[in-house]
């Protein structure tokens, strides 16, 4: 009899359909049955000895929440008979009731129940416990996980012991993940956590990777990549990372319509064993990152979400360094402007490649691009969310140091400074948007354009994580005032360490003294003035935390909550800030 190894994860939902991801312990037919009669079923597919299914569910009633169960070969496996949680549901809230979006990044797996947690309460565990205790309380309509869902290079003691039973940790890559089976173990450890497992079964999720999903500082520079490729372990590590990301995260980001036309998904499902098919895809993505699109779009009523790959799509050549390759940049522009006017795709730059308009790079279709007619003054959306794991707007000192470093590495002050710049870049993790100055300015220009003129949304928000603190920053453009309220909203970690050095460093980085120091550093680098200026309007806040945006009509409200231990041994989310954005 087939058993449920991991899941279910409720991934995509809209008014009438959904997808539910599961991993079973053997081949079987996976089925989802809802209390209102909606259902779906599919056969599992096989990757590297593991069995998975992404079950499409159709026939859901808009504006309802229906309980569901999972069956494998006709036997119910979810919810478990001894579950202490409420039934999992698929909710299809009507768009006019607003959308509540929770987001964060950077989550180490929580220790087993009763184990010591050296980094404090897990914000996702705590959010799950609150929802389970009061199902009628405000709960997210969707959860955005903005990178570092697993840590391939910082494993737990339990996983280290497990890996040591398989291979010699004295051999590279040592006590880091080496292959697909070890990646699968990371997801198993993280998503089997009872609170997180239930939360992901009942709140839809959207995900995008960051560096630790593969390795710290993934794709920092061309020289970094050359050094990694010179090792005898990197290729297997990278291919396994991309393969496991596609299976565990990317598949669920796509709608049933997109899945139905995805050639890779079809090829994997049609094969008795899809391992070689998926490995070939990952090898092509490694050799030619521009051939694959990991970014995707989701529309929630009049809220548009663009989840942007700021890791694999980089151009690393020093003379044309960019956060997004030309096709990816053209896709982002098209999705931002789609339905606004006939500007979508115009002036996309020399980067527009064949097919960039339709998002047909393998692995990730462009998404549902229904919008208002061109020129509609109301516009196709009231709120634009750009999810990128790395913050666009950083503390001013950090931004200026990264811009200076990019100039040094490009040879602005000669070969000696370039060599020093590369060492500093790797040692200090200088690889955010600011380290790609042309991409930083291009995103600034695109955001200003999206937020200005007829059809402008009420808000444009850049949602990010990575930097292990939370803050709000608001930009302004010289001689230009967008009609939309624009903000950088950063929230991390969900569950990770925040050492004193990080706290002190970022507090100083946001200070006036640091800003003055940054200007001097930028002058040494002969850095051009930025296309945008910004000020911090909230934070910095440190701890395990989660942000929530509540978007209703043209209003937007932001809440930040931190997970803290209570005296009775429980944990709770404490309100840190609650403010109107628009």
Image (cartoon, rainbow, N blue to C red):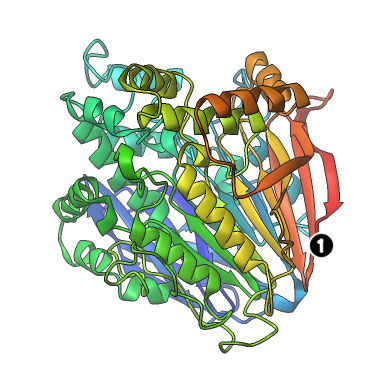
Q: Residues within 10 Å of mark 1 (few under 14, many from 20)?
A: some
**Which residue is at 53% across, 61% downward?**
306
Report which quarter residue 44 is drawn in.
bottom left
The quarter of the picture where the C terminus appears is bottom right
Residue 473 located left or right of residue 424 = right
Frontmost residue, 223 versus 416: 416
Residue 576 vertical placement versus 204 (above, below) = above
Residue 1 located left or right of residue 21 = left
Residue 526: x, y in percent?
Answer: 50, 31
Residue 185 located left or right of residue 239 = right
**Which residue is at 69% across, 85% downward?**
377
Task: In the displayed orientation, state which residue is furthest to the top.
Answer: 170
- Asked if residue 316 can be seen in this view, the reply is no
Residue 270: x, y in percent?
Answer: 18, 67
Frontmost residue, 300 versus 275: 300
**Which residue is at 74% across, 70% downward?**
98
Frontmost residue, 545 versus 413: 413
Tag 1's secondary structure? loop
Frontmost residue, 119 versus 328: 328
Count of numbered marks? 1
Residue 346 vertical placement versus 519 (above, below) = below
Residue 418 vertical placement versus 552 (above, below) = above
Residue 425: x, y in percent?
Answer: 43, 24
In the rendered image, which residue does mark 1 sit on? Answer: 582
Residue 353 vertical placement versus 475 (above, below) = below
């Amino acid at each position: 009899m087939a058993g449920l190894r991991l899941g279910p994860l409720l991934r995509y939902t809209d008014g009438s359909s959904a997808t539910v991801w599961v991993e079973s312990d053997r081949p079987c037919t996976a089925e989802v049955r809802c209390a209102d009669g909606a259902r779906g079923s599919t056969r599992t597919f096989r990757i590297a000895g593991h069995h998975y299914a992404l079950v499409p569910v159709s026939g859901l009633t808009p504006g309802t929440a229906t309980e569901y169960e999972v069956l494998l070969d006709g036997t119910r496996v979810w919810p478990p008979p001894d579950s202490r949680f409420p039934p999992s549901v698929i909710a299809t809230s009507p768009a006019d009731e607003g959308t509540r979006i929770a987001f964060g990044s950077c989550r180490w797996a929580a220790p087993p129940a009763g184990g010591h947690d050296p980094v404090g309460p897990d914000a996702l565990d705590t959010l799950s416990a609150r929802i389970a205790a009061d199902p009628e309380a405000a709960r997210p309509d969707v959860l955005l996980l903005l990178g570092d869902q697993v840590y391939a290079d910082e494993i737990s003691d339990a996983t280290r012991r497990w890996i040591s039973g398989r291979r010699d940790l004295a051999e590279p890559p040592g006590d880091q993940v080496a292959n697909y089976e070890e990646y699968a173990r990371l997801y198993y450890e993280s998503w089997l956590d009872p609170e997180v497992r239930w939360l992901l079964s009942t709140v839809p999720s959207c995900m995008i990777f960051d560096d630790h999903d593969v390795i710290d500082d993934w794709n920092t520079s061309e020289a970094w990549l050359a050094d990694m490729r010179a090792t005898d372990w990197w290729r297997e590590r990278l291919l396994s990372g991309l393969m496991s990301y596609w299976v565990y995260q990317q598949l669920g980001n796509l709608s049933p319509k997109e899945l139905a036309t995805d050639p890779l998904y079809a090829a994997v499902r049609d094969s008795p064993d899809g391992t070689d098919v998926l490995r070939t895809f990952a090898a092509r993505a490694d050799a030619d990152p521009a051939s694959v699109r990991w970014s995707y779009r989701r529309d929630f009523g009049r809220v548009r979400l663009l989840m942007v790959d700021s890791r694999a799509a980089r151009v690393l050549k020093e003379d044309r360094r960019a956060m997004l390759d030309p096709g990816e940049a053209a896709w982002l522009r098209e999705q931002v402007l789609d339905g606004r006017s006939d500007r979508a795709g115009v002036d996309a730059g020399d980067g527009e490649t064949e097919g960039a308009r339709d998002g047909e790079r393998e692995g990730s279709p462009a998404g549902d691009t229904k919008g208002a007619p061109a020129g509609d003054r109301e516009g196709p959306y009231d709120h634009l969310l750009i999810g990128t794991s790395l913050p666009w707007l950083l503390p001013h000192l950090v931004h200026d140091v990264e811009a200076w470093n990019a100039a040094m590495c490009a040879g602005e002050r000669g070969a000696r400074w370039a060599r020093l710049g590369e060492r500093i870049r790797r040692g200090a993790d200088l690889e955010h948007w600011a380290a790609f100055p042309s991409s930083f300015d291009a995103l600034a220009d695109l955001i200003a354009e999206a937020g200005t003129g007829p059809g402008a949304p009420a808000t444009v928000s850049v949602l990010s994580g990575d930097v292990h603190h939370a803050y709000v920053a608001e930009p302004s453009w010289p001689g230009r005032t967008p009609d939309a309220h624009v903000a950088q909203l950063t929230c991390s970690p969900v569950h990770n360490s925040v050492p004193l050095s990080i706290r002190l460093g970022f507090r100083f980085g946001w200070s006036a003294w640091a800003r003055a120091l940054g200007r001097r550093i930028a002058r040494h680098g002969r850095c051009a003035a930025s296309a945008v200026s910004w000020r911090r309007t909230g934070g910095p806040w440190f701890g395990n935390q989660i942000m929530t945006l509540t978007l209703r009509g043209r209003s937007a409200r932001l809440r930040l909550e931190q997970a803290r231990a209570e005296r009775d041994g429980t944990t709770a989310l404490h309100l840190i800030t609650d403010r109107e954005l628009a």
